[in-house]
Image (cartoon, rainbow, N blue to C red):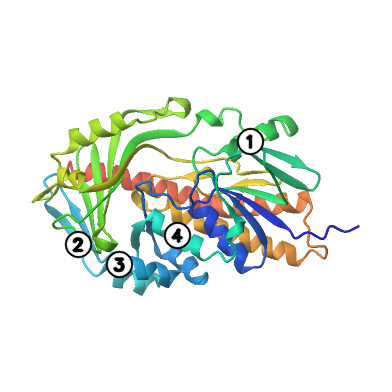
Amino acid sequence: MADKRPFRVVIVGASVAGLSLANMLQANAIDFLVLEAYPTVAPQVGASIGLLPHGNRILDQLGLYEKVMEIAPPIQIFNFRDTNGQILARHPEMDERLVERHGYPMVFLDRQMLLKVLYDNIKDKSKILTNKRVVRTELVNGGVHAVTSDGTIIAGDILVGADGVHSTVRSEMWRLAGRLSPGLFDPNEHEAPPCENSCIFGISNLCPGINPGDLHCVFRNSSSYLVTGGPQGRVYWFRFQKLPEKVHGSAIPRYTEKDLQKSLSEAADDNILPNLKFSTLIENKVSAVMTPLVEYVYKQWHFDRIITLGDSAHKFHPVGGQGGNAAVESVALLTNNLVKALKRSPSGRLTTVQVESMFADVQSRRKPRLELNHRYSLITVRTQKHLIRL
């Protein structure tokens, strides 16, 4: 008897990648289920996100671009500043220039705000399950199971890991491949991702001199700042700090609240503008988090019916703003490939060979662009460090 259930995509992580994919599948009438580890879909974790023209173009196709623009002003002015906050270069009307060249502007908003836009657009909220932390994956005949920490088993035809840089899905994929296809994955790759910088990213309430639509890059000897004026008087900021030495894998530090407070205190006297010090952003902060900046594009993203996308497959330094936009592009290509594959299938099912071919196409077509994104971010960081010495 033919299997009458619909083809289902299990998405691990209600991230930007995960919820974008859910919206794309919804638009194409493909069944999905999102498993989110945390109690809420859009928690405030102190992070902002920059949406570039190519990311906004895809959101527009989903009918979500105008909703984002109702929330956030476009970036209008790029300001590049020295250690004292003095202007090195200023580029006005950047919103108009970007629209002229690429069709869409750049905008910054709370990551939480973008997740809410994506979540609110999901018609059937029962397809988003919270408090479902995936701890194991298993391959079954013609499908895949995700097992959560409470013992729930979720069945699907394919599983997409959109669960971030510390991806459980990636670890499980490696485990399964080690047993079923030894040698497919580099056994040393878990120690390969490098880290040369840390970042404190935060959100503050209104600060004098930081206007909505302003972007400020402040260059210092071993650190730099990216500060933008966002919606509702919000100020989004990143403080990038070079580590004493490059570290890899398990040697990458994990930061505590004590580490965060120490770093904030040490940097408090830094100038953002000539008359605005970092201490004001600290005093007005809504939230702040300190994290190591892992920068890596993994060699292999998929195995059998499992694929990783977004930060779980490709992680960049945030200075170029490529991370979230790259994730949206990756899940768009997966969706396009899946739609085509299902249309060609009379049964509405896909064999494992067909799934693997589809995943391989996503990786081969996306990887060159993502490696370019990675190099762009690295070059931008190194250029900024040299500018202050000129």
Q: CA distance from mark 3 to mark 2?
A: 10 Å
Residue 64 lies left or right of residue 348; in this view the side is: left
Q: Earlier in the sequence, mark 1 or mark 4?
A: 4
- Residue 326 on image: x %, y %: 48, 54
Count of labels in the image:
4
Would residue 24 be seen by someone viewing this image from the given angle?
yes
Residue under pointer 3: 73
Marks 1 and 4 close (CB-CB < 8 Å): no
Q: Is residue 390 left or right of residue 372?
A: left
Question: Where in the figure is residue 62, as x and y percent of width and height?
Answer: 52, 69
Closer-to-camera residue (161/88):
161
Q: State the residue position of label 1.
A: 172
Image coords of residue 174 (percent x, y): 64, 34
Q: Earlier in the sequence, mark 2 or mark 1?
A: 1
How far apart are the two marked residues, 1 and 3, measured between alpha carbons? Answer: 41 Å
Q: Amino acid at mark 4?
A: Lys
Q: Marks 3 and 4: which is nearer the front? A: 4
Compute the Cα span from label 3 to label 4: 17 Å
Task: Look at the numbered discs 2 and 1 and tell me whether their residues touch, using CB distance below 8 Å.
Answer: no
Q: Is mark 3 in CB contact (under 8 Å) with mark 2? A: no
Mark 3 or 2, nearer chain start: 3
Q: Earlier in the sequence, mark 3 or mark 4?
A: 3
